[in-house]
Image: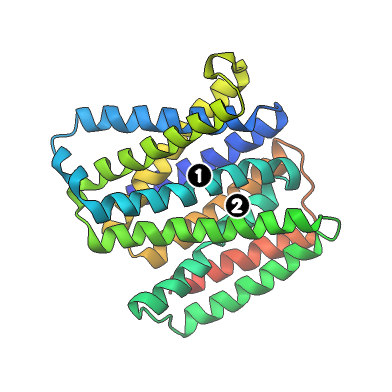
Amino acid sequence: MIYLVLTLLGSCGISYGFKLASIKKTDQDYIVFFNYFTALLGMLIYCIFSEKMNVSSLKNGPMLILALVLMVFMFSNLAGNNSSTDKNGINSTTFFNRIGFLPCILLSAVIWKDLPNLYQILGMVILVGSLIFMLKDMKKVKGTNMLLLFSLTFTSGMVSLLNIVYGKYFSVKTEVLFLTAVFFMAAFLAVIVLFFKKKMPWRCGRDDFTVGLFIGISNIFTTLFMLKSYTVVSANIVAPTTAAGNMIFAAVIGKMVFKEEVNRNTIIALCMAIASVILVNV
């Protein structure tokens, strides 16, 4: 259970970090770079002091392919999260991002024949209803922004699904090395983006560095402990519980700290989403 709590704290930290990035008008490219650079350094330090590290595992072709695919979806989700928080606010961004567990569960049912029970189906129906309520508050959102929000749902679901894939087909002993490879690829891609846009890391602003550092540390907690959670707790518990906790956190922080408007439809949507999570876990 401690792994699940740490996953939730990290996930909430990422949402908070992106809101800070939006307020401080930071550069998205620098934020993404320092996030993954920090995460990579953190995992390398973890590897150095880990007695279970097995470098020979890097020769595992299928594991590296999985790491590459996971990196692509993580990178896309992170960049989209940053952009959407600025355009749509923390509540809507977190909501659409965290309901990614729904396509994750559906794909799990198709791939591994892990069919949902009656309560889980009811929970998914309620979740669709909560999404409808959320959409009522977004009548003025441009079509391109809506596409961005739904892309967050997809990429978030794929990240969760690929974590499950790792848990089912690969060893717990190589999870740290696996995530180190993921963060290395992501940091490398972030460097390519910076140089392509002729931006040098040492020319970043102070806020770019500090917020990116904060998000990177939160990313370590989320990614590492989510992967560990899947080894001790059912996937049907990890993803929905993280989603519900993050939605509540986003709503409270958005209202109390950032003074975002939370109207009746938003409250109903959040309550229905939480109810759906409870049913999915029955």
Q: Which colour assignment does the render follow?
A: rainbow
Cα–Cα span, label 2 and label 1: 24 Å
Q: Residue furthest right?
A: 140
Question: Where is residue 244 shown, x and y percent of the image?
Answer: 54, 58
Residue 250 seen from this side: yes
Q: Residues within 10 Å of mark 2 (few under 14, many from 20)?
A: many
Image quadrant in which you'd find residue 276: bottom right
Q: Is residue 2 left or right of residue 33?
A: left
| Residue indicated by mark 2 | 248
**Secondary structure of residue under mark 1:** helix
**Secondary structure of residue under mark 2:** helix
Residue 214 seen from this side: no
Q: Nearer the viewer, residue 14 or 174?
A: 174
Question: Where is residue 8 shown, x and y percent of the image?
Answer: 46, 47
Image mark for residue 170: none
Between disc 2 and disc 1, the foreground one is 1
Badge 2 amino acid = Ile
Q: Residues within 10 Å of mark 1 (few under 14, many from 20)?
A: many
In the displayed structure, 8 sits above or below 241; it is above
Q: Which quadrant would the C terminus be assigned to in this image?
A: bottom left
Number of marks = 2
Q: Residue at x 63, y 56 (%)?
A: 95
Q: Residue at x 65, y 28 (%)?
A: 27
Q: Residue at x 72, y 43 (%)?
A: 255
Q: Is residue 266 left or right of residue 280?
A: right
Image mark for residue 75: 1
